[in-house]
Image: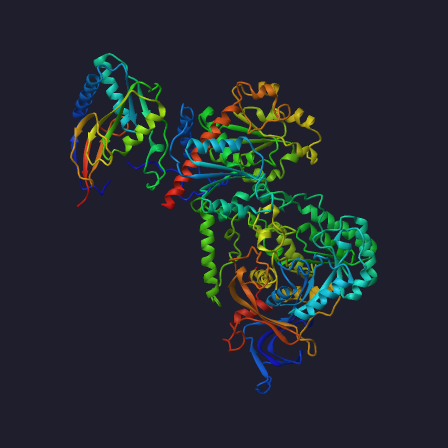
Amino acid sequence: MTLPESMRPTRRHVLDLDDFTRHEIETVLDTAIGMKEILSREIAQVPTLRGVSVVNMFYEESTRTRISFELAAKALSANVVNFTARGSSVEKGESLLDTMRTLQALGADILVLRHSYAGTAHLLAQHFRGAIINAGDGSHAHPTQALLDLFTLRDKLGTLERRHIVIVGDILHSRVARSNLWGLTTMGAHITLCAPPTLLGNEQFWLDTWPDLRIVYSLEAALQDADAVIVLRLQRERQEAGLLPSLREYAQFFALTSARLQAAHAGMLVLHPGPMNEGIEIAPDVAISAQSVIEEQVTNGVAVRMALLYHLALHLRRKGA
Amino acid sequence: MRYLITHGMIIDPSQRVATIGHILIEAGKVARMYEMTDRLPEADPDLVIIDAHGCLVTPGFTDLHVHLREPGEEHKETIATGTQAAARGGFTTICAMPNTHPAYDTPAVVRHVRQIARDVGTVQVEVIGAATVGRQGRTLTEMASLVEAGCIAFSDDGSPISDPAVMRNALAYSRMLDVPIMSHCEDTRLNKGWAMHEGAVSMRLGLPGYPAAAEEVQIARDITLAAMTGGHLHVCHVSTAGGVELIRHARQHGVRITAEVSPHHLTLTDRWVLGTLDAPPSAAQGSLTQRLDQYSHIYAAGIQSMRQSADLPLPAWLNPTLLPPFHTSTRVSPPLRTEADVEALIAGLADGTLDAIATDHAPHALVDKQCEYGLAACGISGLETALGLVLTLVHRGALDMLNAIACLTEGPARVLKRTPSSLRIGTQADLVIIDPDYQWIVDVNQFVSKGKNSPLHGQRLKGRVMLTMVAGQIVHQELGFGMTPRATPVASRLEGILNTDDDDA
Amino acid sequence: MSAIASEKEILNGDEIRRAITRIAHEIAERNEGVQQVVLVGIRRRGVPLANRIAAVLSDVEGVQVPVGELDITLYRDDLTLRADVPLVRTTRIDTNVTDRVVILVDDVLYTGRTVRAALDAIVDLGRPARIQLAVLVDRGHRELPIRADFVGKNVPTSRDEVVEVHLSEVDAGEDRVLIAHPPR
């Protein structure tokens, strides 16, 4: 009658996927299946996290991640408060830790943090008594995005074991790419990175850290035999910073166009963490093609975040009890 | 007051002396040296005997690079607290960098600072004048007037002089004053928005990088300008292997160049920013808290652990996994580099390419460090851990004790073109007593500096300053040190010091 | 579970089969046929029991009664008391339960807390005309005002005893119900 082992009892925060075991990732994804069913109901809400307070601390603009976390918390009947840097004491020079301590004193159990500086979630985790979920910190990590990508890929491909996944775009500055690399490789997938050298950074680092990884400059070559491609958003600032000669040239060589899609393996899935620059990194018709699972990623994101909230909140409440 | 320091291992790099004996201090000067067999002076109520059994007695250290923060940022450090920290670190002379508010860019400010230092300073304070007005990198300061007011060098430290024409003029103009231009070598166009060294760790953590090249191209530029002008270029806090190589080459070609390196760049790497991310899965998340608990435990043990006989294996002495990832105490400019850089810096020190060890003591208030990594103030509060860090190199066999002491005494004096502090009879008694085997745990809360910003909190160091004397006055003394006769020194201690062991590499 | 000193079989395979058959007949009788009935098994062992009841009803009444699977994890009232974080499984009820007769099926009825959670879960899915409860074993010790409509066997137990239900669909070996006594 023993229940299967679930997430490690020691896990208190979700800061990145680099410390997740395969079993732990699978537990989250399996839990998310049940959560997705709840979302499909007419009354898409269960009472599980009544009395738990979740605060969305967003120091960087984000629509979909914040709404996704808000819906996830509400579907589990948690209390949700949204805090954005605009219109708060941050503008008056209140430090992040001060704000965190205020929220802690007000009874916050789980902080969902989005911040433009890498390492900020780790900073809060050192001081906060509850749980921290990193909703994206600088170029460092975006574990919930990676988990929803893993969920979507596993759902469509059956398994990630030995599946070939291409990540194309601004890998150097991408927290989505970093977290996905940890998650995908832990799940046994093979990765190809595709970008111009100015958006790859220290290429030796990628090869040293993940010996099976490939780096390819040509998108056509990268897509051969790919089971899925994750297209990253290209920030226009990169061009302004001189990392690219022009957006036109980038689109010409690195955009996922229908021609490149047709040349690839027929069932190849197309993912994008959003928001898309249609016409730059991805062609509009590719984004809505049959191979695109971009909309499903958004739905799955709520289910995966519910799964994380469920595990972290229960762990916290047990400790408190 | 007269002092007799007995049974110490007397090391004086300026005289190439290393011998066991006694030193008599009288009227602020070194009055006499005694061999072990000599008869000691009669007991006398006015004569304080300091037992230095098993300890080294060396000339006082000089620190070329200290941020005292006064005037303008007295919440971070003051001349009073900064000089107390210096005394604790064994420094009897420190050179204050001009990135204050206002900067040390007018004779009035320089005189003011020197006056405060005379009034409240525990150790000798020298003033480094700003090289350009307001450290803006545009107009040269009135260097001749500033030298008259007491400046011993010029620097815009913290803000590199980006315009090469300004740097050229600074080097050329200073030539008539025979003072060095201390250059903080950084091309800020190559490290925009940087948070740490650009390398594998920055890639992994997604932190914007400061490539080694941003330092190296500027060193190369300044060397060329020094060669052209004949000015004396002093390169501050060299942190890269390429930088060492450029300086070595310039030296060989007769450029007037000197250079310093900080204790932290000689011992720590960018791995320290990664902290515990590599902790085994079983210890992973909650680990942050666990580790903080572990910390206080270590700290408690540290206070108790005075002299511990058991040696710990190296290099476990310095353990980056005591820190959580992204710990802002590791943010420093220039950033902590790689192991290869550390090795090159040590080699540069050993072969004389680098003249001096300078702390770049950069105290900050807690609020400046308790924030996002990329927004945290750069700097390490380094005066009180400098010797302990340098001695890790000696204990490891990477540097011999005489050389290490020389880099803290003779080397800085060479940069300033001064007679090095020494233990010669008749010279001012600026000296330090060091216990090279004293193991202790760094506790930033015990720092006398206002700056508690050190990545070494919780680390075990071996070697500590037990007593510091400036002009014959004790300015720092570990509680009870030297007052009761100490145990006979262990023979092995002396072997390490004299570098007689040639069997371990 | 070597800590258990002795076990006693209270139902064997045949007895389980007969109990299920009887429950199926009672369901048909009580509800005047099974046209409106939806069987909902509570995970895990309620699900095979519901399937077996449906099979009997199909034979007897000639009607294929819909069977759903209900996971009540997210409705439990002991989530914070448990040492582990229970796995969430999927609820799968393809029939709309509104205005139907929902028969909750579980293996053992004990404190009633699982059934309380199941009732909450069902009403979140719709508004059934009636909800009834069928269990293989009722071992007493209710903590909530809940009773079963259809019971395979009433078994008096003490609180420190454990009732183990083995069903071939989910457990290795034969069908049987054991009562295990704790070591003395």
Residue at 51%, 49% (x, y): give it: B324
Q: How many marks?
A: 0
Residue at 82%, 49% (x, y): give it: B165
Q: Is residue A271 left or right of residue B280?
A: right
Q: Position of residue C104 (x, y in %)?
A: 27, 25
Q: Position of residue B285 (x, y in %)?
A: 46, 45
Closest to the observer, A236 or A53: A53
Q: Position of residue C57 (x, y in %)?
A: 23, 16
Closest to the observer, C131 or A314: C131
Q: Position of residue B271 (x, y in %)?
A: 56, 49
Q: Is residue B484 left or right of residue B85?
A: left
Using the image, determine if residue C161 lies above or below residue B441.
above
Q: Quadrant of the N terminus of chain A?
A: top left
Specify whether residue A184 is in view: no
Q: Quadrant of the C terminus of chain A?
A: top left
Specify whether residue C182 is in view: yes
Using the image, determine if residue A260 lies above or below residue B111.
above
Residue B350 occupies which quadrant of the picture?
Answer: bottom right
Closest to the observer, C150 or B166: C150
Colouring style: rainbow
Using the image, determine if residue C1 lies above or below residue B436.
above
